[in-house]
Image (cartoon, rainbow, N blue to C red):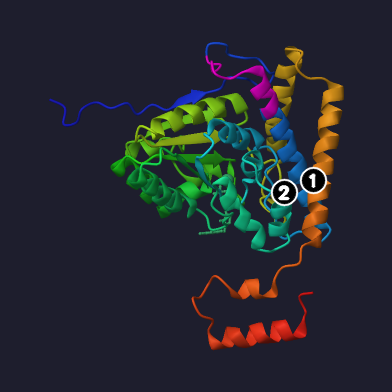
Amino acid sequence: MPLLDAFDCSIKYTQVIDENGKVDAALFPKDLDDETVKQMYIYMCFARALDAKTLSLQRQGRAATFAPLLGEEATQIGVAFGMAKGDILVPSFRQHGILLARGMRLDSYFIYWRGFEEGNDTLKDIGSFPIAVPVGTQMPHGAGAAFAQKYLNTGKAVFAFVGDGGTSEGDFYEAINFAGAFGLPLVSVVENNQWAISLPRSKQTAAKTLAQKGIAAGINSVQVDGNDVVAVYKATKEAAALAREGKPSLIECVTYRISMHTTSDDPTKYRSDAEVEAWKAKDPISRIRKYLEGKSLWNDSMEKEMADKQSSEIDEAVAKAEAFKPDPKSMFESVYSFLPQTLKEEEDSALASGFWM
Ligand SMILES: Cc1ncc(C[n+]2csc(CCOP(=O)(O)OP(=O)(O)O)c2C)c(N)n1
Ligand SMILES: [Mg+2]
């Protein structure tokens, strides 16, 4: 007699559209129409354009230390499109693609990257927690928010993002365990971009997949090609439906950080060009373009029109953000219920000197 009932420990990997734009028709989601795939393509391009602009602003001293998402567009846009309208998002620091597709105000985004928290504040209007840099904290926050949705019976699912490195944090294990034990509407999205600053995925854990960590928590756990927006969309939709039945999920999106960790990092110091080039061949955007072109749904003139529109929208938002004048009092608020004397003195001095203006 076995001591335990048998249970399935295998992890399913899904790819729907490969590097050449070839589709596995049996896996293609029935609810996904051409127009939506086109929109996903447009948002992936928009995310890449926004990313490039922010990097350029940082290099000019017009934005703070920034974490680029280049190469990870399909993971973020796929999740954005698979979530329902009122669902809740808990991003970390590299998720501007999903925030963009969920309707983030672009001027707020640039205000945040100028270093002002006011830019983070408007994310609540799109059902998102603020951008937060601590690694892994998104998970217990997400589990807590999911507990609240269950308690209040809102029917909303919560999507919390964590990196490959973040899955080594205690926060990660505690959150998925809590979600499994309480049957919470939590979808944990592991954006596995193969690197945690300079630590490669191979040294992060001896586990073969990051998805399998969810098995121990008793939750639905899958792995998808994170450079395939359709596979990510499909897994997200399925996980969202399960979440609404009180079944949490973990989706490991296998992707790659093509760019630097942040603008203060030099990845050439710790990884080879050959590795980066191999991943560039799996680019998430070009495969969807090939797919759309194959169906005569996209062409060069549409590409140009799209790029021009996105670039003027971005430029307009930058101009607005650079004209933004923060209230000097704002940096003294929201931490203490009343201001300690030392900070009060600093506040008085800041206001008197007018250095902010
Ligand atoms: C708790 C904590 N420890 C360390 C750091 C410094 N840090 C910032 S990002 C990062 C690596 C995160 O890697 P991963 O989770 O894979 O996410 P990625 O940056 O690849 O998106 C580290 C160690 C931090 N921000 N928070
Ligand atoms: Mg990583």
Residue 59 vs 328, above or below: the answer is above
Tell me, yes or no, if residue 283 can be seen here.
Answer: no
Give the magenta-colored segment's residue range: 27-39
Residue 167 locus on image (x, y percent): 47, 47
The amino acid type of the residue labelled 1 equals Ile
Residue 59 vs 151, above or below: the answer is below
Which residue is identified by label 2? 106
SS category of the residue bearing label 2: helix
Residue 187 locus on image (x, y percent): 45, 39
Q: Quadrant of residue 149?
A: top left
Residue under the image location 53 percent in, 72 percent down: 335
How crowded pointer 1 is (Cα within 10 Å; few <14, some 14-19, many 20+) is rated as many
Numbered label tally: 2
Q: Is mark 2 within 8 Å of ligand 1?
A: no
Whichever of callouts 1 and 2 sits on the residue coming sooner in the sequence is: 2
Magenta-drawn stretch contains 259 = no
The amino acid type of the residue labelled 2 equals Leu
Tell which of 119 and 92 is nearer to you: 119
Which residue is identified by label 1? 314
Dot 1 and dot 2 residues touching (CB under 8 Å):
yes
Q: How far, Cα to Cα, is label 1 from label 2?
A: 7 Å
- Quadrant of the frame with the N terminus: top left
From the viewer's perspective, is 64 left or right of 188? right
SS category of the residue bearing label 1: helix
Residue 99 locus on image (x, y percent): 63, 44
From the viewer's perspective, is 204 left or right of 348? left
Residue under the image location 72 percent in, 68 percent down: 326
Tell which of 181 and 112 is nearer to you: 112
How crowded pointer 2 is (Cα within 10 Å; few <14, some 14-19, many 20+) is rated as many
Residue 184 locus on image (x, y percent): 36, 41
Q: Is mark 1 within 8 Å of ligand 1?
A: no
